[in-house]
Amino acid sequence: MTDQLALSFYELGTVFTPSASIDNSALFAGRKPQILKVIDAVGQRGQHAVIYGERGVGKTSLANVLHDFLVKQNLRAIEVVKVNCEQSTNFSSLWHSVFRRLFIQRAITPAGFNGESTNESMPASALLPVNVTPDDVRFVFEQVNRHTIVIIDEVDRIQDLETTTRLADTVKTLSDTAVNATLVLVGVGDSVDDLIGEHPSIERALVQIQMPRMSRDELFEILNKGLPQINMTMDEDAKVEIARLSEGLPHYTHLLGLHSAQIALIHDRKNITKGDVKDALSIALEQAQQSIVRSYHKATDSPRGNLYTQVLLACALAPVDELGYFLSSAVRTPMSLIMHKPYDIPAFSRHLKDFCEQERGPVLEKEGYPRRYKFRFKNPLMEPYVIMHGLSKKLITEDELERLQGGN
């Protein structure tokens, strides 16, 4: 590899980042309605926001770039703090972590009659007791005395029920007292209840912002923003192919964008073709997250003739609702297409049941009641992987994939 090629590969890695969330607003794509809702919440004293949705749709990337967007709105007096939750996070450790990042000025008067007071900067956490209450949080924010945005990411990782209950109580306390602070809670979930439980009293204080999967135009925007940064271009049919395979998840747009650009550069080209995307497919499968690869093999490993591979592919191709769920009946058409003959529910119902059990992952989760269960992938990132694997093994053709996806 030449020095120039190595440098180009390095630059690519700063633009297409499948392994990390976006932290550069210049490269952040889409999500304008969600950003506007957050800005609206910030502008209203007593309002807070909760951002929720599937894993992998870009919630953390949005949280990372909120500061830049707020500054662009000339809200320069705002101070933004972002913290990540862990399984061990409790209410006290959370707020000690937040207030360590905020500083206040305190007047220090020396002993004696002639000493002049001086201002000393200290972390706001110094005002907190060891065991923090929601009212302690209110008190410290009042001492900070400037508009503060606190972004609390990965709220869903908190295991302690008392912590989520106190977090909801904090939202209510800050809202009721109109403290000059805005909380933005971020996490995986289908609803606000999944993050902080059922607290009807705080509904009026929360702007609820669901992050859906990205539209095709938003996935295009990822490519259209990134490529000029590295002086490269991409054919439109190549963009369409990447968007189709990404299934609305930006991780795969970054992954395929990265590897298809690398292939073009290896061939001394600055333009990326659909052929480069096809070649990138095998690399993307090889370099997929190991947890996805292991889960896939656990779900499909079986003696020849058991159809687990084909049924899982049909599940990935089934049309879904806004929360990613599909019905058993939705699997019939893709399964029949894959097998080149009609297949009805009894032929694969056992497979769907098995996919929801520990022996095969579970790779799917279900809800509902008998004869009306609906299913979805437990990890959304598995879905595009299954489709790409099916294409690579020629279980389905590009034309068939396009037909199932309605030509989008």
Image: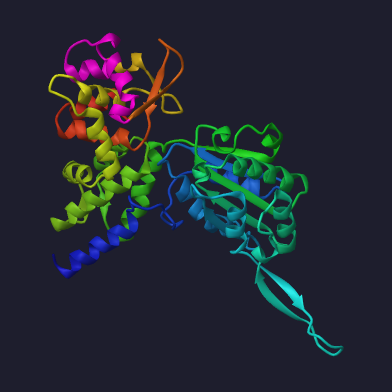
Magenta residues, dominant SS class:
helix
Quadrant where the N terminus lies?
bottom left
The residue depicted at 24 percent of the width and 42 percent of the height is 238
Task: Using the image, determine if residue 408 lies above or below residue 289.
Answer: above
Q: Is residue 93 left or right of residue 371?
A: right
Screen quadrant of the C terminus: top left
Outermost residue toward the right in this view: 113
Residue 336 picture quarter: top left
The stretch drawn in magenta includes residue 340: yes
The color scheme shown is rainbow
Q: Position of residue 335 (x, y in %)?
A: 24, 18
339 over 47 or under it: above or below: above
Q: Can you name the residue that lies furthest to the bottom here?
A: 114
Instruction: Give the answer, above or below, for where 243 lies relative to 408.
Output: below
Residue 46 location, x and y as percent?
72, 46
Is 115 positioned to the left or the right of 64 in the image?
A: right
**Residue 19 at x, y = what percent?**
33, 51
Image coordinates of residue 406 in percent, x first then y, are 31, 24
Residue 233 in view of the camera:
yes
Q: Quadrant of residue 136?
A: bottom right
Visible residue check, residue 406: no
Task: Examine the structure image and report whether residue 130 is included in the region drawn in magenta.
Answer: no
In the image: residue 117, left or right of residue 5: right
Residue situated in front as seen by the camera: 369 or 330: 369
Count the labels in the image.
0
Residue drawn at point x = 34 percent, y = 35 percent: 247
Identify the residue shown where x is 66% and y is 54%.
131
Q: Nearer the viewer, residue 130 or 102?
A: 130
Q: Is residue 266 left or right of residue 212?
A: left
Magenta segment boundaries in residue numbering: 333-361
